[in-house]
Image (cartoon, rainbow, N blue to C red):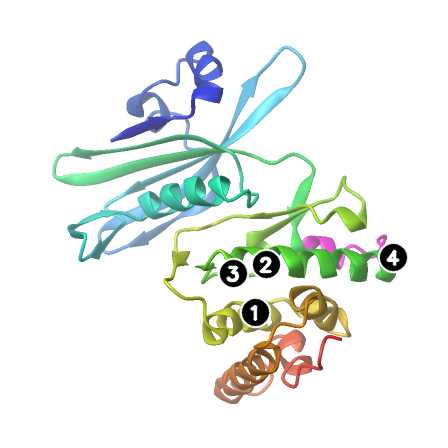
Amino acid sequence: MEFINPAYQELLARHRLLDFNAFWSLPEDWYEEPNNRRRGWSGVSIHRLPLAEEALALFVKRQENHNFRSPTHPGGRPTFYKEFRQLLALKQRQITTPPLVYYGERRRHGRRQAVLATIALAGYCSLDAWLADKSIPAGEKSDRLEKIGRQIRKLHDHRFQHRALYGKHLLVNRELPADAGGLAFIDLEKTRRWPLMTARLRASDLAQLLRHSPALSGGFDRDLLRGYCHDRPPWEEKLLVRIEERLARKNRRRPPGEGSTAGQDAATPKAPG
């Protein structure tokens, strides 16, 4: 199968990137080193398209024999197919993700290959990097984290669980004021939409974020949860208990001296109100 975003078709035609082989043959200037597993691999490179005013950067993901199986795809399908589907679904619900440009997959010599290309978001950085920036006042971070909490809540209210909700997979728009939010979700291969979004599923994502982002300690965790529970939902108390349980369980499993301070500080999350 092959998908080309009509909004970028003219641009891709100008740079002769209108088919699978054109993307697959791009230089392997890896942004992230390929991940090798089960006789397959998956890697990300960045490719810049020169324009009249400035260059437009694309993240180009390529993989070979990096597949998943499910009841609907018993023969296997590239894991990027799941991300492709989630990008379309989240855009439909006005949840910010990198704009999708191209998706394609093929079989070559009995091996499944896939390409996924998205626009690199200018002016964004990871939540971890943004929190670590000491030039940003603590009050501004608190205000923005409340808005970020609301945007994570929106994702969950649409019944999507990210399932890899780390600070590096949340991008903050540095160019927007604190009260604007400006959050984008990336790396959606594991994201799943459920028939019902329970407190357990919500807590799983939030505890994962708190545990793996050390800079969310010292009260910033409560700012994020305050935004998430801004309307005091009826399941708020159950959610906080679930988060506490998950963080405490993970901390017990962690060898002494390892782990994030965020997870330790948030092991007994305070009511966000």
Q: Which residue is mark 3?
A: 156
Q: Report the span colored magenta.
A: 129-136
Q: Amino acid at mark 2?
A: Ile
Q: In terms of secondary structure, where does tag 1 sit?
A: helix
How many numbered marks, from 0 up? 4
In this rendering, is residue 235 above or below 50? below
Q: Is residue 153 left or right of residue 160?
A: right
Distance, label 2 to label 4, CA atoms, is: 22 Å
Q: Which residue is mark 1?
A: 206
Residue 152 - label: 2
Q: Is residue 227 left or right of residue 72?
A: right
Q: Amino acid at mark 4?
A: Pro
Distance, label 1 to label 2, CA atoms, is: 9 Å
Distance, label 3 to label 4, CA atoms, is: 29 Å
Q: Is residue 265 left or right of residue 246?
A: right
- Say whether marks 1 and 2 touch (CB < 8 Å): yes
* Residue 240 image offset from top left, x and y in percent: 60, 80
Residue 122 image-quadrant placement: top right
Q: Earlier in the sequence, mark 3 or mark 1?
A: 3
Q: Residue at x 59, y 73 (%)?
A: 211
- Say whether marks 3 and 4 touch (CB < 8 Å): no
| Mark whose residue sits in front, 3 or 4 | 3
Q: Residue at x 56, y 28 (%)?
A: 57
Q: Earlier in the sequence, mark 3 or mark 4?
A: 4
